[in-house]
Amino acid sequence: MQLKHSKYIWIFGLLGTAFIILAPIVLLVSSPTEAKTSAWDFVDQDRRHTSHATLITGEFTTGSEVTQTCLTCHEDASHEVMGTAHWNWKGEPVLVNDNTEPIAIGKANLFNNFCIGIQSNWAGCTRCHAGYGWTDANFDFTNTENVDCLVCHDQSGTYVKTTGGQPAEGVNLLVAAQSVGTPSRMNCGYCHFNGGGGQGVKHGDLDESLYYPSEEIDVHMGQYNFLCVDCHKTDDHQILGRSISVSVDNKNQLYCTDCHQDTIHTDERINSHTDALACQTCHIPLGAVQEPTKMTWDWSTAGQDLGDDPHTYLKIKGSFHYESGIVPEYAWFDGTVDRYLMGDVFDPTQVLDMNPIHGSIDDPDSLIYPFKVHRGKQPYDTIYNYLLQPQTAGEGGYWTTFDWNNALERGSELSGLPYSGSYGFAETRMNWVLSHMVAPKEQALQCTDCHSEGGRMDWEALGYEGDPMYWGGR
Amino acid sequence: MFRISRRYIMAYTLWVMGMAFLVLGATIALGSEETPEPTPTAPVGDPSPLHPVFTFLDADGNAVITANTPISTLKTCGTCHDVEFIRTHGEHTDGATDRNLTIENLIFDSQEASSVEMNCFLCHIPNPNNAARLSTLENGQTDWASTATLLDTGFVVQSEAGFAWDTTKFTTEGELLPDVVTIQDPTNDNCAACHGVVHTQARDPLVFSPCSSDESEWTTLSTGQIVSPQKILNSGMNIEGKAELSRTWDVHAERVVDCVDCHYAQNNPVYYTEQDANKPDHLIFDPRRMDFGDYLYRPLHEFANEDDMRGCENCHDALNTHTWLQYTERHLAVLACETCHIPQLYAPAIQTIDYTGGTPATDCRGVEAGDGTPANTFITGYEPVLLPRTDENGMTKLAPYNLVTAWFWAYGENGDPVPLADVEKAKATGVNMTEALKTLGYADARILGETRPFQISHSVGSSAWAIKDCQTCHHPDSRLTTSIALGNTPTGETPQFISDGRASLSGDITQTDGLLLYTPQTQSDVLTLYVFGHSSASFVDVIGTLMFFGVVVGVFGHSTLRFIASRKLPPAHHPRKRVYMYSVYERQWHWLQTAVIFGLIFTGLIIHKPDIFGIFSFPFMVEVHNILAIILVVNAFLSLFYHVVSGEIQQFLPQPHGFFGQAISQAKYYLGGIFKHEEHPFQKSPEHKMNPLQQVTYLMILNVLLPLQIITGVLMWGLQRFPDLATSLGGLPLLAPFHTLVAWSFASFIVMHVYLTTTAGHHPLAGIESMITGWDEIESHEETSPKPTGNEPPSENVPPMATEPTAS
């Protein structure tokens, strides 16, 4: 049969041509590099929020009245908030330490080595509670009208809370209510930048420099104008993120890798580090980049007239010191911790670690993380060998009487933790993961920061034979 | 809080001590009455983990603390180490450690072996005091040079009375106490003492004196190389575009590769590498090694360097990491790694040193106005010049260099340099220098200029900072030929090039208004490179252009005449009939080839002249060109197969009989008949598609031009895979222009070919239509031609098939 008489000869012609063309292309052209996921794919960049300026009218005299107004449309809002740690100051019950029964822990019932604890000091501490009126142990956690919507949603910048979480005198609640919107850095920072009684005191990576940070302080907020809630994503008022100061597990935690996926370093050697290092370790070379954070707090020297200096000594608080640009301490960390609970007996001759970190070089889930470690000295019962709860704030508290025995008795009465009448001061430490204030990539740690004489890592303390560059990794 | 490392303290102390010592020296020299401050004692380094205690001995073998004599390294270290072996097997052990090989020392000092004892401490303790050492040499206290080096250890103190050993650091027998033995392997700081700016702390901003005259920084001064793990943007210098410079000063320092990791002692068992050539076939691994003890007794102090060094390629697998780079082997064969990986130096380097005024006047490149202090000097950095460097295997590659030109007074037949002191004397007389020097005994005094190359191998950037843009070199303004200024000539003469034994010049030093400029060439006695997009044989382009536009003009003229003729004389209507002229396959291969050839010419043109077609990606065009070429070759061979098997190839073969007559009549037709709408002299038919002129043309194209183009193309492509063959045929400098010339011929042919198709049919586009549809209307010269039998050979007397093909 002659080719030219087939009706479909052109198909063969086309296929032949295509083959001649495609074969060399397939042969020569290397496969294109895989498309990478962009971190922006995981960021909700739509920040539109309905203006409430015309929706809310009327006169408000109490915060609860504002909440009632909110609830007329956002019916479930209070119930949602009431299921969160922002309201309860406790999380879901979990197994803590060696306990067999799950217990709910949080600010409400834990000690720290800053202001020690809220019990007996409710009114003072709860000015940061997302509610109204928590002044004693009898606060009604079921009253939807006690939820404070404004502390997180006010965008007027005029909303200020005071004792018991009540709006300060002079706050124009209507203006605040009409301004509501997506929580900004101001809203979160109002409490979280000021934990421990002043800005930057507690975390080492959260302070007021983050309201309007330069990119040198925080690349996410400074360069890309992130809000806290861009990463701490929120569903029905449940906000993603945990802190090992109050949580022991890592459920509902968020990670750099939630957005920064795939192989993000072009350099093989750097990528090989991700088996052992958390992102933060290299990308947060320094904590408390600009504003200083409290590094030590010794309550035992309080009560003396040594001359108050807000940087080093206050009669009501004792001696302490702040540092900025801190070089973190590094440890293996699997995301969970143990937690010192009220009434736990400890050995006062040793430094009490209030939230011992879980993790080891032998645990494949552990990574080396950077920590700010806050070292304290705080009252404990020398007979019972446990930490004590003093009443510091309010009438009769230590800050007015400077009488430890009295303060501890009052604290014991209100917290229910027996006090033998004999107190001393125990050394404690508390660990804080550094996760904010991510530096621009140019400032990330370099090889020689760790792999050199006098480098940052104490290899042997971390469990290595020596510098893993020479001795091999885990 | 930063921990301040010991090294930093030492480096700092060294600096402080050095400065103090310089001040001290100056004070003494000036005859000041002031008592110099006693030198402060610096902290001693960590005790050495392994090195045993030892006794400090003087040249007579007595403990130095008893006689308060200078230490002798030969005696002291020689107790355990074979110092004579070390002395005779090392570049740093004899004379060279006295002074740096600066231009000044090269020109004015004879490089005779030094009488100074080799100085072990300079490299083997953490805090050697080099300034103190140099000072003793200057003062003629050569015996005390090694002792002075120890000044910062606290073993010895210096006062006006001289050096005195601190007996508290020794046992009564003169043995050093264990906790102060700090003997160590050389660190970067040790090397830095003489070899330029080396900075070890990534987070302490690097500050250095731009274009200083500190001899110990000669390596940096002469090249701009700086070794530091620090990102340039974190440095303390005022550098152009600093904020964007997130690269480190040197990627090896960044990655904790120390000086001695590459420049190691060659018999160090740790670095021993087995040569494949020496390995018996039955062994995978030869476990026999020199014992560490033997090594420590006789460590070679000939450090791996240049010839014998682990070069870039000993650690880096360039082939596998450059898969993105087209013609990788070719690039690696002609370019040193440094050429792309050190594209820019970010520190100033000396351009000229003028010794004609006595006191040297130094001029640096890569730096703009400023007062010379680190804070107030604007550093622009500079692009090193590329010179051919011939390695020990005879391979010549382009590598980055700085060129330093020195001008000095010379005299006599040999052009010996006039000592600077005498130049100063002559200058002080205030009269004509030549005369003044003559009076001082220097006959025939004249100014000479010497230009020396200084190789650049450090300050490597990470891969992201390497040159990756093809057009950096593949462009008329190629990086390969970027010129470098050599400063002004004081005499109007061009300086003489003094090679370092490896580098040569491949271009000329020219001068404009006294300013000297060296411009490299890609083709010279020492270098023959044809760089696509940069090189071209201009005569080829001239010939090609003439040919191409000649054809265009010819076609234009001919068609104009045809047009005019057709208006005067309406076309004659020759009887025509429809025939099936071109089979499907013929059309397929024709049009595929058309598309491919157009593509090849287009991409080839871009590769040839990338500057004109800046919007196209050069590497992409190269890739497309190669793929198209493969398609062309495959298509050509398939077509050849078809024509041979089907016998259609006969169509292309001119018939000897009557060929010339027909060819002439065809030519006549084009020159005359066509304007009168005469019948075509050749009757086209499916069996005779081509007239004699076409046959000759295609014979030329298919048998000469196409194979030539394919062969030159393959050779050029294969230059990296089988370079010898291509090189033996003249290499790229011959092949590439040839390829270009043939390409011009193809382009010209296409114009002619397309035009002639318009003459083939009854209307201008008929020819093209027939090649698309397969059907052609041909002139029917004889109404009653007999049907061909199919057995007869085609002949001019046998009319072709005149009917449509029928289905079989």
Image (tube, coloured by chain):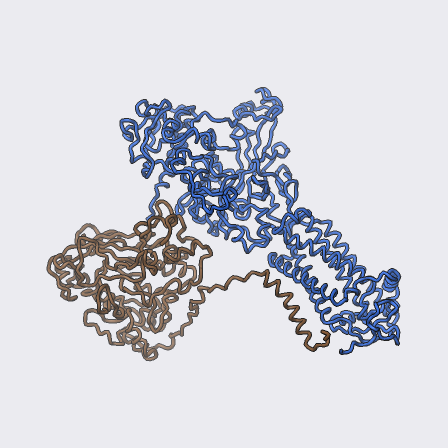
Chain colours: A brown, B blue
> What is the quadrant of the C terminus of chain A in the image?
bottom left
Question: How far across and how far down the image is residue A313, in percent?
Answer: 22, 52
Residue B528 x %, y %: 65, 44
The image position of residue B450, as x and y in percent, is 59, 33
Q: Tell me which corner region of the image, top left, top right, bottom left or bottom right, holds residue B152.
A: top left
Left or right of B493 in this view: B192:
left
Q: Position of residue B801 (x, y in %)?
A: 83, 73
Q: In the rendered image, is residue A258 in sight?
A: yes
Give the vertical position of B705 relative to B373 (above or below): below
Q: Quadrant of the N terminus of chain A?
A: bottom right
Of B338 and A31, nearer the camera is A31
Residue sitting farthest toward the front: B282
Please tell me which residue is depicted at 38% across the width and 76% down the height of the picture: A54
Residue B58 against residue A376 in the figure, above or below = above
Q: Furthest residue to the left?
A: A421
Left or right of residue B689: residue B39: left
Number of labels in the image equals 0
Q: Is residue B555 above or below residue B20?
A: below
Residue B534's place in the image compared with A46, above or below, is above
In the picture, measured across the screen, residue B605 lies left or right of residue B465, that is right
Q: Is residue A174 left or right of residue B571?
A: left
* Quarter residue B199 falls in: top left
**Visible in this render: residue B367?**
no
Of B613 and B594, which appears nearest the observer?
Answer: B594
